[in-house]
Amino acid sequence: MSKPRVLIPVALGTNRDHDLAHAFELAGAEANVVPLTALRSGAFRLDDFQILGVPGGFSYGDALGAGRLFGLDLVGWFGDQLHAAVARQTPIIGVCNGFQALVRSGILPGPSHSAVLARNERHDFECRWVTLEPSTVRSVWTAGLSEPLRCPVAHGEGRFVSGDLDALRAADQVAFRYVDAGGKPAGGRYPANPNGSVADIAGVCDATGFVVGLMPHPEDHVLDRQDPLRGRPGAGAGRCLDLFKAGVAAVV
Amino acid sequence: MHERLGARQEIFGPQAVSRCCDPHAGGVGLCELAIVVGPGATIDSDTRSQIQALGFSVRSLETFRVVHIRARSDDPAHLAERLSEQLLIDPVGQWWCHRGELRNDGLIVETGLRPGVTDREAAELVRIAAELGLDLEAASIGRRHVIDVHRADGSALDAGRDGAAIELLARRVLHNEVIERWGVGELAPAFAATEAEALGTLSIPLARLESDGLAALNRSRRLGLDVEELRVIQSHFAEQGRAPTDAELETLAQTWSEHCAHKTFRARITFEPDGEVVDGLLKSYLRAATDRLDAPWVRSAFVDNAGIVEFEPGWDIALKAETHNHPSALEPFGGANTGVGGVVRDILGVSAKPVALTDILCFGPEDLPLDRLPDGVLHPHRVRNGVIAGVGDYGNKIGVPNLAGAIVHDPSYTTTPLVFAGCFGLLPTGSNPTMAQPGDSIVVLGGAVGRDGVGGATFSSQTMGVETAEIAGSSVQIGDPIVEKGLIDVVLEARDAGLYNAITDCGAGGLSSAIGEMAHTLGADVDLALVPRKYPGLAPWEVWLSEAQERMVLAVPDPEPLLELAGRWSVGAAVIGTFTGRGRLVVRDSAGGDPDQPVIDLDCGFLHDGRPQRQMIAERVEVGHRSANRTNDPIDPAATLLRLLAHPSIRSNESVLRTYDHEVLGGTYVRPYGGPQGDGPGDGTVLIPPGTSGTRGMALGIGVNAAMGRLDPGAMAWNVIDEAIRNVVVAGADPDQLSLLDNFAWGNPTDPATLGGLVAACAACHDASLHHGAPFVSGKDSLYNVFVHPDGTPDPVAPTLVITAVGLVKDLTVVPITGVVEAGDDVWLVGPPWGELGGSHLDLVLGEDHGGLVPQHDPDALGRHREVASAIAAGLVRSAHDLSEGGLAVAAAEWSFAGRLGLELDVSGATEVLFGEAPGRYLLEVRPDEADRVGAFLPSGIRIGSVTDSGRLRIGPIDLDLDDVGRAYTQRTSAHRTSADRTSADRTSADGPAPAGGGDE
């Protein structure tokens, strides 16, 4: 059987495209990094692919707000294809800037919710490792994950602000929460919750569970050698490869 | 939501009820809008304390973004609404209004960029608006500060009465005049001109000028040449029977500048009075050692933009470190930003993919009282914050991990801060084509040309003074990392497709140096009319010389596929001429004047080889007079250790490092900070470059020491080379396969004593390179780091040499980790237990030079590096830390803090033992049952104690609670920024709602 094809669209300033491609390849997929211009020209179409991974970076230098222009590109140029992909339950993941773009484009958390990824509470940009608790069974991406994940954050605008937090929780769309190293809720405390996100929300999914987005970078912890705890207690736990395997498994 | 509206109403004036269009709006199409986005950002604690230091008290200071638009529209109100709703505000928590609707009482200061300064956000706004069908002619983004600040007597600052005080506030805190304008009340936008008269080429009459006239010409055009060089130019054009054009003269000045030609490093230096001659520092010392070593892993050294060394079969590493000092002194964010951009471009200039960055930053004391700050100098605190923001911004945005660095504080860096930026790249072996062919097209890739960055090479080769900020504004640029990211993608794809025969970057000197270098013997014919420009009104010589970080020049046999590739990645590309093979550099401007009358027609031989070798005089540095005897009173060891840990050059920089992305690319193996909490300082760092076999690592180490440099430049060079080597050895690298980079930042080399110190340091580099078998593969010197005070007193920088060592980690599984690991393990000290105290960090905290020797070259240090490496290779070393600034006590404290475990070290309490510094010393952690095995690897090692779970740090007479150690070491080293520093950073990121509880750290 041929490998599922993942589309990784790239805007000017995207920079974690190869990290995401690497993670999907380790998970058993074929990753295709494609500039938006090549999609726009019609050389590629979204429905040529089974999975969409929107990568991290600084698309357009974060001009007018992180992810805004990338999000406008996605809906402005491929709105029909994108909504069709969502409708036919294509697994979609947005990481960091890709998450910001999916939120800006209204795909996440979904049409009935408004949300913003605002400037971090403390720092203009911060890079540190965090621990994440997968917190919904609604999503195909997270349903099989039983253990917390560990991976780095690297962003300046990642503070999740919800227009209607209760509705989001009631719909079970909180996909990841920041927890401390012992797995207990971060409770808004820095640095376990690195950016001041409301209710420790690190990522959300849409109502179908096929679209997920998160600020941290699971694609940068898919190998044991990437673990900063190497040689210490706790090393080896929290690898994020199963997240990508879950997305791939959903289409094979 | 109701609360938000309430807050909004407070800041609106009485006219807010009417939704009139902006007062600037015209009725017949062309309108100007000024849209304010709220809520404003509230003042942070750092800005507050800066304003307080000026003698004012701050009630409030709120900063709004102002977006200026010029557009053709019949319905400006509708345009403003669509732009704002769709592009400017967030759906949750933000609002917009016309500027005229905002309450206008109280003190208002607005700032905006000078026309022509890179403004990526404004450019993106115009682009995306067009996608939405909104046609904007221009956009510009500024800031509005609503200020409630009071004088000491309690009265509020008033626009009518307190002009001087407001100017002080604006210049010191709110804006940077090098790139920005400011005004009280509403500031009109300064759009770059869309139409302007084309400027022509001038002929510069030289023939009759005597020395005085030549010197005056040199000053008025800021050429940075000496009279001897101008005489050679004069006679060259006399032979041609004509005067040079302005473009020719500027091209020669750039090509012959210290920055490009390394005049001092190539000069013939005569020592007085003994008459010894050094015929070129590069040739006699740095390259001489590399040539003699002829190391098999060196692919290329000192010939291209960067050195290239072998990594593993099929893959090579390119390495380069640069300095960017002068610009960083004037515009810290932009200077550091473009410093990173420049060195990344150097790596791209040898066809390599950038995979790691380093930064070494040198600042004055952060607590310098404002009344001791010289005129024309930014406060070290502001320089530090701006530089750190600039380094982080560029690296984070291009997606290259920042893996190693240092921050050094010294009083001499107040007037001359130093910024060293390094970059490491990966390329398939043999994939860097370097030979342009006759008939190749000249393709320029990347950003369009503007007036920013004109004259960068000559500017950076001169001393600075109070007036420099005003006249050098155009030499300072703001980087555009997003364009450079695109460039990287295009160049690497073009490399793999074999689309070019040669490539180089437009560094200082712009097209003139790039094309001049590539056309070296071939010659070229260029038409400036084909060069993409940001705006009209540039003189031909400005187009030819404008520097931008984000531009490369390629020699391309068939340009079509490359132009198509560039289009796919949204990167600008244009064919602007051909390499001719005729040996002349010919530049025309077919858009202006006579195409048959070239702007430049220079013989390539004269351009590159016509410069007379500089003759210089040096004096010997007297270092032998220091005695081993110390003059200081007895010290309290524990209290002294805590003071050392809190010293700005030693204390934790973790909070700075966290503002840099060190994880992108997924290849980071040993991080700058480690341990169970991720906050313990490491030594060298290791990257497993993405795409390689994954079985090897690249280790990076850095050495720098200002205090020793001032006392003994030669010994300093030995010590910093040793420090860089220790770092990579701890990271698991093989000490017998190292490559080195040198970066000198020195004062005025025409001063014989200063030059004598430089010669001593270069000679030591030569000897140390041979001794360690570690070749230099690339380097960069920055001279004339002198600030001239208004009374004429020169204020030179401390002689500073930064050494970067790159090593190979051949077995990743044995690499020691950062911070001690387990109670009960043995601690071994490798090397002598005592060090020297001359030029030590102990003297920095004691506040003066108390004598003693500067650590000298230790011929046994190399053997100890090998011992440690062999113990690591045998898998016996669980953790390790080298002894450097502050000696044994500081190293043990950092190591213990990093691992959150105590230490019990049985050593003498002598000051030389606790705080002495010396080369080739390490602390190693080893399992107790492996003492015999490890002993066999470490003839120079001795077991001095163990790791404990007591929570105490015990080193001889020192007995401290680990919590106190941690508190001293981690005192806040905030990376906060002032409003002025963040203008540049913020231009490319939207203002989110003001963070709740922010600014109280």
Image: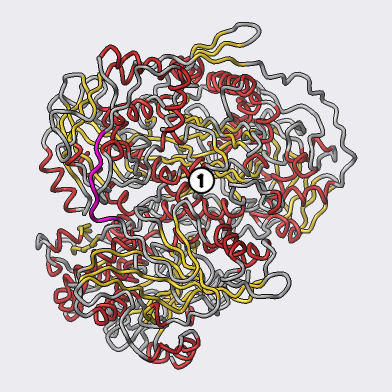
Residue at 21 percent of width and 46 percent of height: B532
Please check the rendered image and state whether residue A143 is part of the magenta-colored stretch, yes or no: no
Closer-to-camera residue (B214/A139): B214
Chain name for mark 1:
B
Using residue B307 as the reference point, say whether residue B701 is left or right of it.
right
Q: Residues within 10 Å of mark 1 (few under 14, many from 20)?
A: many
Q: Which residue sits furthest top?
A: B275
* Residue segment shown in magenta: B193-201
Q: Is residue B196 magenta?
A: yes
Residue B855 image offset from top left, x and y in percent: 71, 28
Q: In the picture shown, does residue B767 fall above or below B105?
A: above
**Which corner quadrant of the image does residue B342 belong to?**
top left
Q: With respect to residue B836, does B790 lie above or below?
A: below
Left or right of B628 in this view: B746 = left
Q: Residue at x 48, y 16 (%)?
A: B267
Q: Amino acid at mark 1?
A: Ala
Where on the picture, by quarter, is residue B459? top left
Q: Residue at x 44, y 27 (%)?
A: B218
Compared with residue B921, is residue A159 higher up or lower down, i.e. above or below?
A: below
Residue lying at 84% horizontally and 46% vertically, measured from the top left: B637
User: Going by the picture, which residue comes out furthest to the bottom?
Assistant: B2
Tag 1, which secondary structure?
helix
Front residue of B538 and A133: B538
The residue labelled by disc 1 is B469
